[in-house]
Image: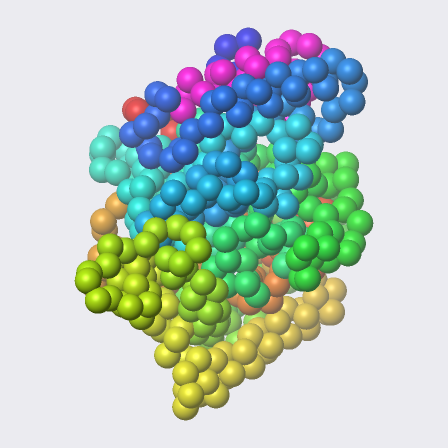
Amino acid sequence: MSDLNKLSLAEARDALRNGDVTSVELTEACLKAIDAADVLNAFVHKTPEIALERAKAADERIKAGDAPAMCGLPIGIKDLFCTKGVPSQAASKILDGFKPEYESTVSQQLADAGAVMLGKLNMDEFAMGSSNETSVYGNVVNPWRRGNDDAQLTPGGSSGGSASAVAADLCLAATGTDTGGSIRQPAAFTGITGIKPTYGRCSRWGIVAFASSLDQAGPMTKNVRDAAIMLEAMCGHDPKDSTSAELAVPNFEAMLTGDIKGKKIGIPKEYRMDGMPAEIENLWADGAEMLRDAGAEIVDISLPHTKYALPAYYVIAPAEASSNLARYDGVRYGRRAQLAQGDGITEMYEKTRAEGFGHEVQRRVMVGTYVLSAGFYDAYYNRARKVRTLIKKDFEDVFAAGVDAILTPATPSAAFGLGEMTEADPVQMYLNDVFTVTVNLAGLPGISVPAGLDGQGLPLGLQLIGRPWEEGDLLNTAYALENAAGFVAKPGKWW
């Protein structure tokens, strides 16, 4: 079999079970593709020795007939997941040289299931960004291009390395994390599938924290079936994470029937933004039509507090970040600044944090510290928490009225060029999260499915939002949408 790295998880799993291919062959094909794609800057810590060792072990396990679905499948791990003995920097200078002595629960579960780690993937520093331009490793490049234009495009953020690697067939799938859209937005920008599960479905233990009440890990894959396969391996109760849900994990793949007859799909009127590009508007209408043709009932709904979601998110997330990032001080691990004669502990903290954190992280830490400070706590942070409760209630009311899933655009545009959104106006960048942050604030599951191309040949995604803990049902609706959209486009290989 040629082009083994282009297989989906399901195809590779079946080929492994049938004896058509070995995990070592699959892994070698991916390692070769990774080495030939350095220009994309997706993989930042390659681990070929670990990969081949795990691949050999997986082949033995498959031969013995004791192999879960993920066994032998080569994947990439976002640099936010701690991986034992392998640099885990969260794409920040302040964690330079940090090699954890432990494994994150999610990456351990994938390893236990026999998945093969190819290496660590680039991302925005501490997962703060929508374009993968805040990384200490440099920008990730989207494998897609606009027509014949060779301008480099963003793969989205913060899981940009994961998205770029999956879209360019450097790995069969990858882990991502989503705090305000960081799985779904890059998935939409690169023409792949990305699901953020319900808050608490995947353990956060061993994942470098950005905003603890919003962060959630999830898979980034080539299609919906692969997302179901990988999500099942990543989920499960973890006593080390107090927010992890003690719920049985269903067989998500078995729930993919494609039958959505009688399902109620809500279209929220508040997501019709001023100035939304016609292509996004049309894709959204087409998506609703596809679901209607598949037998679903399309209903108009209202989520009245949507307009407050972005401001509430950009108060809550930086507040939690400023608290979480206080632990990076150069004392116990990571980078420590060079000190001058006579410098004390305070100067060490100041210099280490000033040179260790990038501008975007500094900006958010300062915003977060401000909204938590005496005199502003009630005016900003507490008010944002109240707004969050109202946003959650909007969704609860809609689901209580019988709606099964909600269809929205995934992003307000297709991928933009690297450097096109200047640092002079960070708010422009923050507006990229307009369709995704509500899902994190409400703790709901959301999935981005590629559904079409824009006029310049770039992928566009649609988002489905589901009821809490009903990822199986959400994946099935996404599966029906994927089948109707028939999206099979791939980026032309230029790297």
The picture places residue 149, in percent across and down from the top left corner, at 22, 34
Image position of 493 (left or right of 285): left
- In the displayed structure, 490 sits above or below 321; it is above
Expressed as whole percent of the image width and height from the top left, the position of residue 80 reads 48, 47
Nearest the eye: 223 or 457: 223
Q: Residue at x 77, y 40 (%)?
A: 251
Q: How is the image coloured?
A: rainbow
**What segment is highlighted magenta in the picture?**
6-34
Does the rendering let one see residue 283? no
Q: In which quarter of the image is residue 430?
A: bottom left
Q: Residue at x 45, y 63 (%)?
A: 327
Q: Can residue 3 be seen in this view?
A: yes
* Magenta: main secondary structure: helix
Q: In this view, does 377 lie above or below 452?
A: below
Query: On the picture, is 86 further left or further right than 341?
Result: right
Residue at image position (69%, 46%) is: 235
Task: Check the image and name the residue furthest to the front.
Answer: 342
The percent coordinates of residue 89 (x first, y second) are 41, 46
Q: Quadrant of the N terminus?
A: top right
Q: In this view, does 473 lie above or below 54?
A: below
- Left/right placement of residue 485 relative to residue 263 reads left
Residue at 48% across, 64% down:
324
**Relative to the observer, which residue lies in front, 112 or 220?**
112
Count up the numbered dots. Answer: 0
Q: Would you place residue 299 above or below residue 392 in this image?
A: above
- Magenta-span inclusion, residue 220: no
In the displayed orientation, state which residue is furthest to the bottom: 375
When asked about the image quadrant of residue 234, the answer is: top right
| Closest to the observer, 175 or 280 | 175
Q: Where is residue 83 in the image (x, y as percent from the top left)?
A: 53, 40
- Quadrant containing the C terminus is top left
Magenta stretch contains residue 27? yes
